[in-house]
Amino acid sequence: MTKRHEERRADAYRKIQLGGLVIKAGLAELPSNVLLGLLIEGRERMRDPDIVEQFARRGDKEFKT
C-alpha cells in the first residue's frame, strides 16, 4: 500500500469517526450551516480551560451511556 493510499484511508476513517460523534450527539438532523456554527462556537469557547474540562466530563459521561 502506498503512503498516499494509507493517508487517504486514515483521513476517511477519521471522517467516519467524526460523523459518528455528530450522530451520537443527536446533531445529524441539523442543517450543515447550523452544525458548523455550533462547532465554531465550541472552538471559541474552548479558549477557557474550565470549559474544556467541562466538555471533557460531559463527553466522558455520554460515552458511558
Image (cartoon, grey):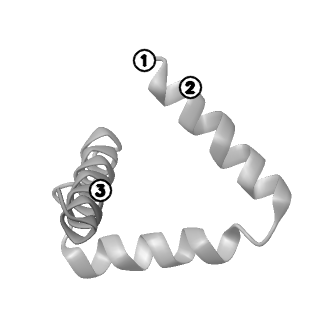
Q: Amino acid at mark 3?
A: Ala
Residue 20 vs residue 27, the one in the foreground: 20
Location of residue 64 with respect to 44 vertically, above or below: above
Given contact means CB atoms under 8 Å apart, are the residues at marks 1 and 2 in contact? Answer: yes
* Residue drawn at the location 68% of the way across and 71% of the way down: 45
Q: Amino acid at mark 2?
A: Lys
Q: Residues within 10 Å of mark 3 (few under 14, many from 20)?
A: few
The quarter of the image holding the C terminus is top left
Using the numbered discs, state the Cα–Cα distance from disc 2 to disc 3 in whole angstroms: 27 Å
For mark 2, what is the residue? 61
Location of residue 62 with respect to 34 vertically, above or below: above
Q: Secondary structure at mark 3?
A: helix
* Residue drawn at the location 70% of the way across and 67% of the way down: 46
Q: Residues within 10 Å of mark 1 (few under 14, many from 20)?
A: few
Using the numbered discs, state the Cα–Cα distance from disc 1 to disc 3 in whole angstroms: 27 Å
Locate residue 63 relative to residue 46 in the image: left or right: left
Residue 17 vs residue 35, the one in the foreground: 17
Locate residue 59 relative to residue 6 in the image: left or right: right
For mark 1, what is the residue? 65
Q: Secondary structure at mark 1?
A: loop
Query: In the image, residue 43 lies at what x, y percent?
Result: 59, 72
**Numbered label attached to residue 30:** none
Q: Quadrant of residue 20?
A: top left
For mark 3, what is the residue? 10
Q: Nearer the viewer, mark 2 or mark 3?
A: 3
Taking the view exactly as shown, the residue that stands out farthest to the front is 1
* Residue drawn at the location 30% of the way across and 47% of the way down: 17
Q: Residues within 10 Å of mark 2 (few under 14, many from 20)?
A: few
Query: In the image, residue 47 lies at what x, y percent?
Result: 77, 72
